[in-house]
Image: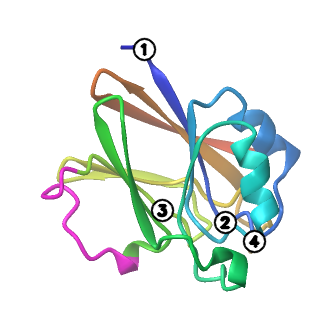
Amino acid sequence: MTRLRIGLVSDTHGLLRPEALDFLAGSDHIVHGGDIGGQEILARLAQIAPLTVVRGNNDTAAWADALPETDTLDVGGVRLLAIHDLKALTIEPRAAGVRVVVSGHSHRPSCTERDGVLYVNPGSAGKRRFSLPIAAGELLVDAGRVEARLVTLVPAT
């Protein structure tokens, strides 16, 4: 089995920055953690790699009606769960066989491991909120092992 690269973005809010597109190039799959801002964002990401996408609290237009609030992806022996807001998580990830939870909402990049589950928020790859950095992330999956990396695309102001 080969090493897989899963690109992570969230909170684009209708803005897909060139820095994010450059970072995501070469991904084997992309997970968007919600607050997409328009179907044109999804169309552009789909040109790069297959997508797993969840609806965010600001994705209220008709185009987003069909998007799930959570979704799972099994890749390279690792199960991922995508959800926009961690506060809406209604399952116990470890008990459900989930190794990685990808979220968004806060616009704050973070990566923590709790009870054998990796929680990754790639931050906001779109419009800046407060003085937070513009960021994205990636998961490197190899034979059931997973490593996360967060990248600042545009530094905080």
Residue 155 appears in the picture as rendered: no
Image quadrant in which you'd find residue 147: top left
Sequence order check: which comes first, mark 1 or mark 2?
A: 1
Seen from the viewer's position, the closer of residues 58 and 123 is: 58
Looking at marks 1 and 3 on the same chain, the residue that comes earlier in the sequence is marked by: 1
Which residue is at 62% across, 67% downward? 107
1 or 2: mark nearer the eye: 1
Q: Amino acid at mark 3?
A: Ser
Mark nearer the N terminus (2 vs 3)? 2
The answer to whether 4 is drawn above or below residue 6 in the figure is: above
Q: Is residue 73 above or below residue 147?
A: below
Magenta-span inclusion, residue 91: yes
The x and y percentages for residue 1 are 36, 14
| Image location of residue 16, percent across then percent down | 81, 55
Which residue is labeled 4 in the image?
37
- Mark 3 lies on a secondary structure that is loop
**What SS does tag 4 mark?**
loop
Give the amino acid type for the residue marked by disc 1 in the picture. Answer: Thr
Mark 3 vs mark 4, foreground winner is: 4
Residue 90 in picture, x, y percent from top left: 26, 77
Q: Which residue is mark 1?
A: 2
Asked if marks 4 and 2 touch (Cβ < 8 Å), the reply is: no
Magenta segment, which residues?
87-97
Residue sitting at x 48%, y 71%: 68
For the C terminus, give its image quadrant. bottom right
- The quarter of the picture where residue 46 lies is top right
Q: Neighbour class for label 1 at 10 Å: few (<14), some, many (≥20)?
A: few
Q: How is the image coloured?
A: rainbow
Query: What amino acid is at disc 4?
Result: Gly
Spatial CA distance of label 3 from label 4 is: 16 Å
